Amino acid sequence: MSGTTREPRPANRTAREFEKVYGYPPEGVWAAPGRVNLIGEHTDYNDGFVLPFALPQRTEVAAARRADGMLRLHSAYVPSGVVTLEVTGLDPAHPPQGADRWTGYPAGMVWALLDAGLPAGGADLHIRSDVPTGAGLSSSAALETATGLALTELYGIPLTRSALAVLARRAENAYVGVPCGIMDQMASACATEGHALHLDTRTLEQRHIPFDCASAGLRLLVVDTRVTHDLADGAYAQRRASCRAAAESLGIPTLRDLPYPELEQALGRLTDPVQRRRVRHVVTENERVARVGELLSAGRLRETGRLLTEGHTSLRDDYEVSCPELDLAVSTADAAGAYGSRMTGGGFGGSALALIDVDAEPEVTRALAEAFRRAGFAPPHVMAAEPSAGAGRIR
């Protein structure tokens, strides 16, 4: 079914739930969005370039300070109730496990602030989100960013949005144990409405590029395959290690430092076939980011479609992070008239993108549902992606 219309969230719902849980009203409510990455996958931890934008789906955190150094966490979606932790006892060597594993994201954000020498303290937090989990849309970054923004504003900590994103990534890397790059947190913290965020992940230089599908008669669909992924497993870390080893073999700091015109010569110097595939993906993907950025800046949105499909082929064959459901979503959307399609996010499940004409949405959506049914897969969830604003205080 199409997700082009969304039911409005009841006013201050998260705040009302906070009061029901804790018995008093919050000091405020902060929100951070999920993100879609238009192009530039698995380039961020190689110091490369990415082109994400924020989604209207967001995570809200209602929060209030505590004077006793305790951190109390509650989610609208977890039935186990309030989880209580000591702020001074937060330890990345002993992250939460099992049913309480979700608390590692907000707790890790508190730990990262304290580890950076910033005066964060105890808090009561209630969390509500409509960012799909496990769909490759950065639900974890949204939770980290919203929590971090709440705490920095409550405790008067002067951080830029970029600095907040850096600490959020540290929380995910060091506390949760996912060796992600900086893209997700930067998109959640820094994106602007109606734009894609061109980000140099080495320097954190940002450029906001207009991305208005509606004015061009286009729509970008997100196809959630409902195949969940867990990037804390070994596959993500293995790819990062392979890229690091390849860069060392080539005598460069990271794969970002290999110019596209020198790719073929460099591949000939690598003896490991896996490293060759990983290098080819990262270098060509950086080139695709540059080309898509140029096309968007020129208002030539339809022409980006071919590059999206090229990116998916590279992720499927060279980086080997796709799955049958993602491949089916891409091939089906392209056959039904999409200008181009690709998986988005870390892979091994999650979501795909499809750039289509607005009036093609019913046919593309129908084709996707039928293809998944014939393959025996669970029905995909299809929604329109609209470039939205980054994190902020909403109450």
Image (tube, grey):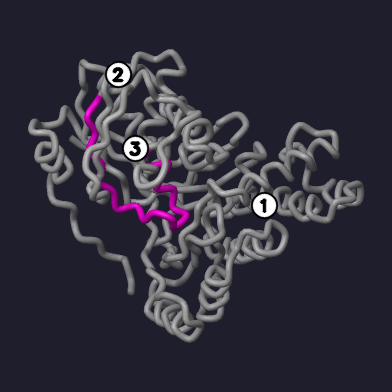
Q: Secondary structure at mark 2?
A: loop
Q: Earlier in the sequence, mark 3 or mark 2?
A: 2
Q: Earlier in the sequence, mark 1 or mark 2?
A: 2
Residue at position x 62%, y 32% from top? 202
- Picture quarter containing residue 242? top right
Residue 321 locus on image (x, y percent): 62, 59
| Residue 389 seen in the current view | no
Residue 177 locus on image (x, y percent): 52, 37
Residue at numbered disc 2: 121
The nearer-to-camera label among 3 and 2 is: 2
* Amino acid marked by disc 2: Gly
Is the residue under label 2 in contact with that under label 1 (CB below 8 Å)? no
The nearer-to-camera label among 1 and 2 is: 2
Task: Identify the mark at residue 391; answer none if there is no mark.
Answer: 3
Is the residue under label 2 in contact with that under label 3 (CB below 8 Å)? no
* Amino acid marked by disc 3: Ala
Q: Tell me if mark 3 has few (under 14), some (14-19) or many (20+) residues whose alpha carbon lies within 10 angstroms of its own.
A: many
Between 99 and 292, the residue placed more toward the observer is 99
- Tell me the distance, in whole angstroms, between the alpha carbons under discs 3 and 2: 21 Å
Magenta-drawn stretch contains 6: no
Decide: is 170 above or below 68.
Answer: below
Between 231 and 309, the residue placed more toward the observer is 231
